[in-house]
Image (spheres, grey):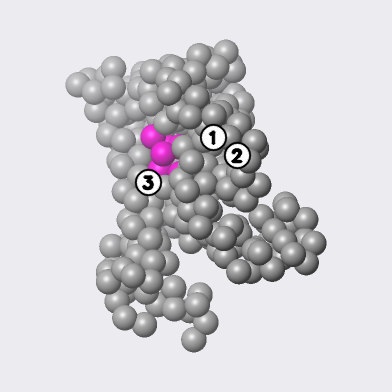
């Protein structure tokens, strides 16, 4: 039995994790297919149905301006997923390389890297995100880049701690004595041995990125009209929760399903990749 087959078997034994994976797959499918099935575009206005509840014409109702809520939720979920995956990939890659390199090279490079990380950890990151995102014009690509540049140092600190033990392993010493360049040792020998941690960090990073983007957009600092995200939809729907509750509950339900499903998947991956965990069952 290969290790990946073992991981897959342990993951499948975790029913909440499998349920979370199925829910996440359904959400991704909805984000990809629903805009093609929607009768109206998310920016198209129907002046004959302003602020209407769900109906056969508009499956999830309309906004006060006549926007189709079904199309907006689909595009908002799609945009939030794109931001979350881009940010999680970026922060995972940067933190993995920086944290592992700091642990391997040690010396002045390690001290300067840790000094930068510890300085950034005491800076109010959400205020920085709000300030820079507000000047981005609501472009999700710029917002994603800002979130990557500000969010990599927390996981880098954890990865540095894990990589400290790896630099003393025999295979690292052997590669160094054979004259293998330092960065090649980091990329080919150290990073693969913390792959399980990186997978879990990536999964949890998706949840963190979704929540951060939602908070920014809810406060008006994130994605802006004509583009939409789950956070901006929830922010606008919160103002009409008594008169038009469907504008709040549908994007809020999509956000809840997304975050809960990814949290369940992360727990399942942690149990499956951790050989000391009893939650994944026996091999």
Depth check, front residue: 189 or 245: 189
Determine contact: label 2, label 1, CB under 8 Å: yes
Q: Earlier in the sequence, mark 2 or mark 3?
A: 2
Q: Secondary structure at mark 1?
A: helix
Task: Give the position of the C terminus as an image quadrant.
Answer: bottom left
Q: CA distance from mark 2 to mark 1?
A: 6 Å
Q: Viewed as shown, does residue 78 lie left or right of 54?
A: right
Q: Position of residue 110 (x, y in %)?
A: 60, 39
Depth check, front residue: 230 or 169: 169
Instruction: State which mark lies toward you, 2 or 3.
Output: 2
Dot 3 corresponds to which residue?
258
Q: Which residues are magenta?
A: 205-211
Q: Viewed as shown, does residue 103 lie left or right of 8?
A: right
Depth check, front residue: 108 or 33: 108
Q: Position of residue 83 (x, y in %)?
A: 53, 37
Q: Position of residue 105 (x, y in %)?
A: 65, 47
Determine the main secondary structure of the stretch shown in magenta: helix
Depth check, front residue: 148 or 52: 148
Image point 47% across, 56% down: which residue? 197
Dot 2 corresponds to which residue?
110
Q: Secondary structure at mark 2?
A: helix
Neighbour tally class for label 1: few under 14, some 14-19, many 20 plus, Cα within 10 Å: many
Q: Is residue 182 magenta?
A: no
Dot 1 corresponds to which residue?
114
Image point 52% across, 82% down: which residue? 2
Neighbour tally class for label 3: few under 14, some 14-19, many 20 plus, Cα within 10 Å: many
Q: Position of residue 56 (x, y in %)?
A: 34, 40
Q: Earlier in the sequence, mark 1 or mark 3?
A: 1
Q: Secondary structure at mark 3?
A: helix
Q: Which mark is residue 145?
A: none
């Amino acid at each position: 039995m290969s290790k990946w087959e073992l991981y897959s078997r342990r993951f499948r034994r975790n029913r909440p994790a499998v349920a979370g994976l199925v829910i996440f797959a359904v959400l991704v499918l909805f984000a990809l297919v629903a805009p093609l099935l929607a009768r109206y575009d998310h920016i198209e206005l129907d002046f004959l149905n302003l602020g209407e509840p769900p109906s056969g014409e508009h499956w999830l109702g309309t906004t006060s301006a006549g926007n189709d809520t079904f199309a907006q939720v689909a595009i908002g979920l799609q945009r939030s997923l794109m931001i979350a995956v881009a940010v999680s990939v970026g922060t995972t890659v940067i933190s993995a390389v920086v944290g592992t390199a700091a642990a391997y090279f040690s010396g002045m490079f390690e001290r300067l890297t840790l000094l930068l990380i510890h300085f950034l950890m005491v800076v109010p990151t959400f205020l920085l995100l709000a300030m820079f995102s507000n000047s981005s014009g609501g472009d999700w690509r710029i917002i994603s880049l800002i979130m990557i540049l500000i969010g990599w140092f927390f996981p880098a600190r954890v990865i540095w701690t894990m990589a400290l033990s790896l630099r003393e392993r025999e295979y690292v010493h052997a590669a160094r004595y054979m004259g293998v360049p330092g960065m090649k040792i980091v990329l080919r020998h150290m990073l693969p041995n913390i792959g399980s941690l990186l997978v879990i960090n990536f999964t949890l990073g998706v949840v963190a990125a979704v929540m951060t983007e939602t908070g920014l957009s809810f406060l008006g600092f994130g994605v802006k009209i004509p583009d939409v995200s789950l956070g901006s939809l929830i922010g606008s729907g919160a103002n009409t929760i008594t008169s038009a509750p469907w504008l709040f509950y549908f994007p809020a339900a999509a956000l809840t399903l997304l975050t809960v499903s990814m949290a369940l998947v992360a727990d399942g991956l942690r149990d499956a990749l951790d050989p000391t965990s009893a939650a994944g069952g026996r091999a």
